[in-house]
Image (cartoon, rainbow, N blue to C red):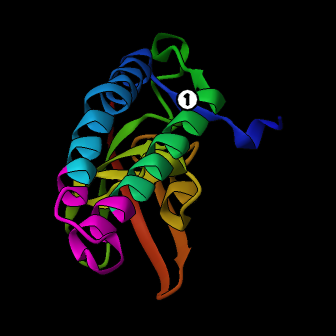
Amino acid sequence: MSVKNFVYLTRERLLELEKELQEMKTNGRKTIAAKIAEARSHGDLSENAEYDAAKEEQGLFELKISKMEDVLLRARVIDLSKMPTDEIHLLSTVKIKNLKTNKTVEYTLVSPEEADLQDGKISVSSPVGQGLMGAKIGEKVKVKVPAGVMEFEIIEIK
């Protein structure tokens, strides 16, 4: 397995994912099985939309379990205490200022599997994530994005 296939997580996040997966495999599967049984009790399965919906939900749920198992299989724990504190790296939380709009935003740089812009988590493989990697407080970085070039100033690194 090549290094770029690894998913880097903190120990806390790894434990959260393991707990969530265990919950899905036990209680989640029981809930879906109950929905399928309920729908099956309504008669003819060939014309039972509720049964079809429950089976589709089961398929999507099992796919989610499979993807989570894959992430955990590829997971590597990062000890943040051993990471440099003066430059941006994976799992850094950074406060940056867009020099064009003067807006300040805060992001945490995460692996692509954890990225969630609404939660302030951007992927290290995204254009902005790549542009910020290795930068230090006070530096100005130019990032090429599909809409052009953005320029940021690094305000804070946590």
> In which quadrant of the rendered image does the C terminus lie?
top left
Q: What residue would you read off at disc 1?
A: 72
User: In the figure, 3 relative to 32: above or below?
Assistant: above
Classified by dominant secondary structure, the portion drawn in magenta counts as helix
The residue closer to the viewer here, 12 or 24, is 24
Q: In this view, does 136 lie to the left or right of 102?
A: right
Q: Is residue 150 left or right of residue 66?
A: left
The residue closer to the viewer here, 137 or 94, is 94
- Identify the residue at image location x=53%, y=45%: 67
User: In the figure, 107 relative to 19: above or below?
Assistant: below
Q: Give the residue furthest to the right.
A: 1
In the rendered image, residue 86, in percent from the top left (x then y), is placed at 47, 28
The residue closer to the viewer here, 124 or 13, is 13
**Residue 11 occupies which quadrant of the picture?**
top left
Q: Is residue 110 left or right of residue 101?
A: right
> In which quadrant of the rendered image does the N terminus lie?
top right
Residue 117 magenta-drawn?
Answer: no
User: In the figure, 64 relative to 10: above or below?
Assistant: below
In the rendered image, residue 153, in percent from the top left (x then y), is placed at 37, 57
User: SS at mark 1?
Assistant: helix
In the rendered image, residue 2, in percent from the top left (x then y), is placed at 83, 38
Residue 48 magenta-drawn?
Answer: yes
Q: Give the residue furthest to the bottom.
A: 147
In the rendered image, residue 50, in percent from the top left (x then y), is placed at 21, 69
The three-letter amino acid code for the residue at tag 1 is: Leu
- Identify the residue at image location x=55%, y=34%: 69
Q: Give the range drawn in magenta.
A: 38-56
- Identify the residue at image location x=25%, y=58%: 40
Q: In this view, does 92 lie to the left or right of 37?
A: right
The residue closer to the viewer here, 151 or 89, is 89
